[in-house]
């Protein structure tokens, strides 16, 4: 699954930016033009509301699931959400999560044995 998520993260960056960069070249950072084009039709508004809700959901999911699993570097997929979008953030977070889950569990046998020994002494 790691390769699957990695490929989708790459595509999730390249494909949206293949549309954004030419637009930026033509219009620059023209926010009025951006919002005008975004809301020209009901389908455009539909797509943007879908994106906005998806952004809120993915950031909440990253924070909740990341903390629950004890993951590090949660800021990276959050920044990816805000700079590229859900198309990068979701596969990137799932890649990080899979890598975290695939890590071997670190067991400190010495401390585990000592804590068992200490507990048995307290019972006596």
Image (cartoon, helix red, strand yellow):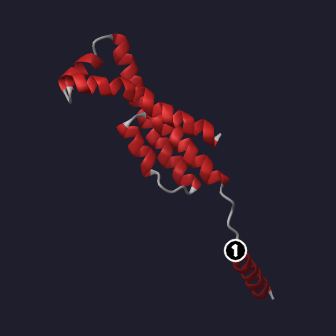
Residue 6, image quadrant? top right
Q: Residue at x 52, y 43 (%)?
A: 93
Q: Is residue 25 left or right of residue 6?
A: left
Q: In which quarter of the image is the N terminus?
A: top right
Query: In this picture, is 15 found above or below 6?
Result: above
Whether residue 53 is visible, yes or no, is yes
Q: In this view, does 81 lie to the left or right of 68?
A: left
Reading the image, the residue beneath label 1 is 108
User: Could you classify mark 1 by the number of other residues whose Cα lies within 10 Å: few (under 14), some (14-19), or many (20 or more)?
Assistant: few
x and y percent of residue 2 in the render? Answer: 62, 42
Q: Please report the residue visible at 40 percent of the width from the left and 19 percent of the height from the top.
A: 47
Query: Residue 16 appears at what percent x and percent y?
Result: 40, 27
Q: Which type of secondary structure does the marked residue at label 1 adopt? A: loop
Percent position (x, y) of residue 26?
Answer: 22, 22
Name which residue lies at 20% across and 21% down.
33
Nearer to the camera, 40 or 24: 24
Figure quadrant of residue 15: top left
Q: Is residue 40 above or below residue 69?
A: above
Which residue sits at x=75%, y=86%? 122
Quarter of the figure that contains the C terminus: bottom right
């Amino acid at each position: 699954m790691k390769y699957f998520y990695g490929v989708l993260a790459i595509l999730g960056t390249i494909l949206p930016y293949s549309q954004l960069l030419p637009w930026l070249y033509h219009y620059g950072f023209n926010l009025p033009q951006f919002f005008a084009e975004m809301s020209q039709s009901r389908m455009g508004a539909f797509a943007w509301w879908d994106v906005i809700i998806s952004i809120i959901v993915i950031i909440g999911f990253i924070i909740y699931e990341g903390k629950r699993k004890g993951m590090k570097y949660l800021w990276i997929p959050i920044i990816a959400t805000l700079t590229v979008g859900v198309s990068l953030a979701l596969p990137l977070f799932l890649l990080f999560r899979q890598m975290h889950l695939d890590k071997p569990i670190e067991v400190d046998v010495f401390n585990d044995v000592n804590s068992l020994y200490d507990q048995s002494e307290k019972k006596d």
